[in-house]
Image: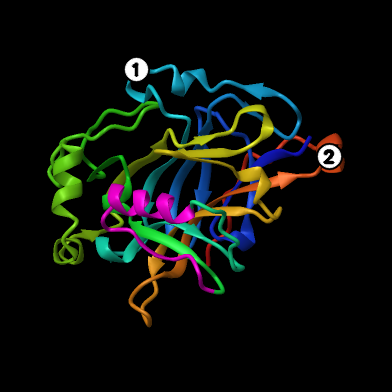
Amino acid sequence: MPRLRVLVGESPETLRPISANDPAGHPLKTSRFEGTISVFLKNFENENGKLSMGEEYFGKNERKGVTWSIQARGRFLKEINADDVLFGNVFDRPLSLPYGSSAAIKFMQFADPTLEDDFYGEKPWALSPLITTMPYFSIRESGETGETGLLISEQASSILPDATHARRTYFRDAKHRQDFKFTPSHHIECDFCQGLLSFEHGGLSVSFPMVHFDLMQYWDGRPVWFVCCERDKEQGKGPGAMIWCVGFEIMADAETAGAQAPEEDISGDVD
């Protein structure tokens, strides 16, 4: 049975495999980011056939109902305004969307009014400003103290208040995002976690209100990428330079039979 493999890197072209549900996270240094990336998948069966429940993360009351998570902790290596740092999906080929997709897209746009997308182009994408789309987000000056642990939560600091709704509401205004600058002295922690996806039994499915997709029926075998990237400067929207990327790819039966342990060190040389 095909299984999923998790990969991390600066861009889709530089991905390396990592282990999911690792509380320690995975170090990553790119030309624009330095920190760690963690991926948690509930009841996940990896490419070696090993079942990982992810109880260290999903067993917490604060994550009840969550089935997957992508976490990033670290700092941007150059100053950039919050409107130009995006997070979401990019694809390198047209999508064949299943029946019912329009309802799912409307739900996504309702849940995140700052979402912009182009699902029908040659290279589709769906991206939102990082500061508004993250369910959990904290930022502080590097000298400030703050809680650290497996779960990322909103924390009061000299930069932002500790209220998720207030943050997301305030930064829906593009002018507010453009006025807010991330700098290399800012330590950022964010957790993109949801309960829409299921990774059980080596498969992948997604559920929206009144709509359920078995994504393995529509997946063409190419990787799915979640990226943090800059806004395209020429177009004013869509993906520009990559900051970091998490990929999910299907491993065929022949690959899973000879799968090796994933690489742990994904730090790269930076010019």
The residue carrying mark 2 is 253
Numbered label tally: 2
For residue 61, the mark is 1
| Residue 36 image offset from top left, x and y in percent | 47, 42
- For marks 2 and 1, the one nearer the N-term is 1
Indicate whether residue 118 is drawn in magenta. yes
Q: Is residue 39 visible?
A: yes
- Is disc 1 surrounded by few (<14), some (14 to 19) or many (20+) residues within 10 Å? few
| Residue 176 image offset from top left, x and y in percent | 14, 61
| Horizontal relation, residue 38 to residue 261: left or right | left
The residue lying at 17 percent from left, 46 percent from top is 167
In this rendering, the answer to whether 263 lies above or below 14 is: above
Nearer to the camera, 158 or 21: 21
Indicate whether residue 79 is drawn in magenta. no
The residue lying at 22 percent from left, 41 percent from top is 143
| Horizontal relation, residue 29 to residue 186: left or right | right
Q: Secondary structure at mark 2?
A: helix
The residue lying at 39 percent from left, 74 percent from top is 232
Give the amino acid type for the residue marked by disc 2 in the picture. Asp
Q: Which residues are magenta?
A: 101-121
| Residue 191 image offset from top left, x and y in percent | 37, 39
Q: Is residue 227 visible?
A: no
- Is disc 2 surrounded by few (<14), some (14 to 19) or many (20+) residues within 10 Å? few
**Mark-to-mark CA distance, 2 and 1:** 36 Å
| Residue 109 image offset from top left, x and y in percent | 32, 54
